[in-house]
Image (cartoon, grey):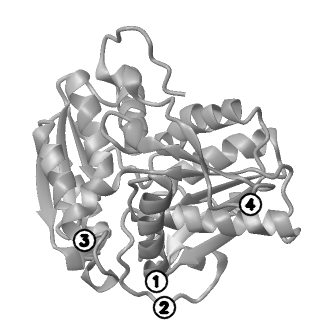
């Protein structure tokens, strides 16, 4: 893990091979491990899809050198694409709802991208529509569209999952990941299901999010502070495959906030809200395996810590819960 010992020709060569680290607050007999994706150069898991999608699109001719990618994003995908775009001679434009992290938007601009804000109340659905409108106005512009592009999940099938598999010698009992686009969970789940059909797959969302509607549940749509995962419009989440998922855990914001603080103070993990939600769900699954309530082929549980809390400090993630701005 993270064993680059020779000079590298490009920052793109540093993407992936992130550490897999034990989460100590899990049963010894059913350990939880997390991929620390802040070790990527853009400091999030979305660097993987930024590089992978652009390289594949250039190879296929969907995107030409000197062309423009226009992406609706909450921020980290924009940063990941922007890191790759400059190195691959591609222009980048991002459509971002206003409420999302100011730090992320500043970083996208610093990486040479243009950022266009849309009203918070119009949601990600409107941001997607606006991205396509802009693409139609520009020559040589395409919308990778992380919410529906199979390359998103494929990136994790080809990189994240094999790294986990190698690190644990194939002994993975459960895969747990938050779903925003669902690309991380879908790519990782498909990889492990093909090799270990009995692996237990768990999706994670904030309480108030609507992913459970894929399983016919009635959900009270409520605002939530946890950022980067969840949805209020399941029709935009085209990558999610319910057949690959055994269960969904909805995690309340207050528990997420407490876990962010605990992970920092007790385990040294400066991670953001989606990572804390993943940790809580993964520990639940580990306890279920330990107690015999969850059937899994191995005891170990894997999840991802998608990014760093430093990207959200202006939102008060380490202040009192009431002061935390979602």
Q: Residues within 10 Å of mark 1 (few under 14, many from 20)?
A: many
Q: Which residue is mark 1?
A: 208
- The answer to which of marks 1 and 4 sits earlier in the sequence is 4
Neighbour tally class for label 4: few under 14, some 14-19, many 20 plus, Cα within 10 Å:
some
Q: CA distance from mark 2 to mark 1?
A: 6 Å
Farthest front residue? 266
Q: CA distance from mark 3 to mark 2?
A: 26 Å
Q: Which residue is mark 3?
A: 316
Q: Nearer the viewer, mark 1 or mark 4?
A: 4
Query: Of circles 3 and 2, which is in front?
Result: 3
Residue 128: tell me if it is visible.
Answer: yes
Residue 94, relative to residue 90: is it above or below?
below
Tag 4 residue: 27
Q: Which mark is residue 220?
A: 2
State the quadrant of the C terminus: bottom left
Q: If you read the primary sequence from the N terminus, does the residue marked by circle 2 or circle 4 appear first?
A: 4
Q: CA distance from mark 1 to mark 4?
A: 29 Å
Image quadrant of residue 322?
bottom left
| Circle 2: element type | loop
Q: Secondary structure at mark 4?
A: loop
């Amino acid at each position: 893990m993270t064993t680059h010992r020779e000079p590298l020709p490009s920052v793109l060569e540093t993407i992936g091979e992130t550490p897999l680290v034990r989460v100590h607050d899990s049963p010894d007999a059913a350990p939880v491990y997390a991929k620390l994706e802040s070790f990527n150069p853009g400091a999030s898991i979305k660097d993987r899809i930024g590089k992978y999608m652009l390289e594949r699109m250039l190879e296929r001719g969907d995107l030409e050198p000197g062309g423009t990618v226009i992406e609706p994003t909450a921020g980290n995908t924009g940063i990941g694409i922007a890191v790759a775009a400059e190195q691959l001679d591609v222009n980048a434009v991002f459509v971002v709802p206003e409420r999302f992290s100011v730090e992320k938007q500043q970083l996208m601009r610093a990486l040479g991208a243009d950022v266009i804000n849309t009203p918070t109340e119009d949601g990600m659905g409107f941001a997607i529509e606006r991205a396509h409108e802009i693409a139609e106005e520009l020559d040589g512009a395409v919308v990778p569209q992380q919410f529906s592009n199979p390359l998103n999940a494929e990136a994790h099938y080809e990189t994240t999952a094999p790294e986990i598999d190698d690190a644990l010698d194939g002994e993975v009992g459960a895969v747990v990941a938050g779903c925003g686009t669902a690309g991380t969970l879908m790519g990782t789940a498909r990889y492990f299901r093909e090799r270990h059909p009995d692996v237990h797959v768990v999706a994670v969302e904030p309480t108030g999010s609507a992913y459970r509607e894929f399983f016919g549940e009635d959900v009270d749509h409520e605002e939530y502070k946890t950022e980067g995962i969840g949805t209020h419009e399941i029709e935009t989440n085209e990558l999610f495959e319910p057949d690959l998922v055994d269960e969904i855990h909805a995690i309340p914001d207050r528990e997420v906030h407490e876990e962010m603080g605990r992970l920092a103070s007790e385990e040294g993990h400066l991670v953001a809200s989606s990572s804390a939600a993943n940790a809580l769900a993964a520990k639940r699954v580990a306890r279920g395996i330990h107690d015999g309530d969850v059937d899994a082929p191995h005891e170990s549980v894997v999840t991802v810590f998608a990014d760093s809390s430093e990207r959200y400090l202006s939102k008060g993630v380490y202040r009192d819960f009431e002061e935390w701005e979602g």
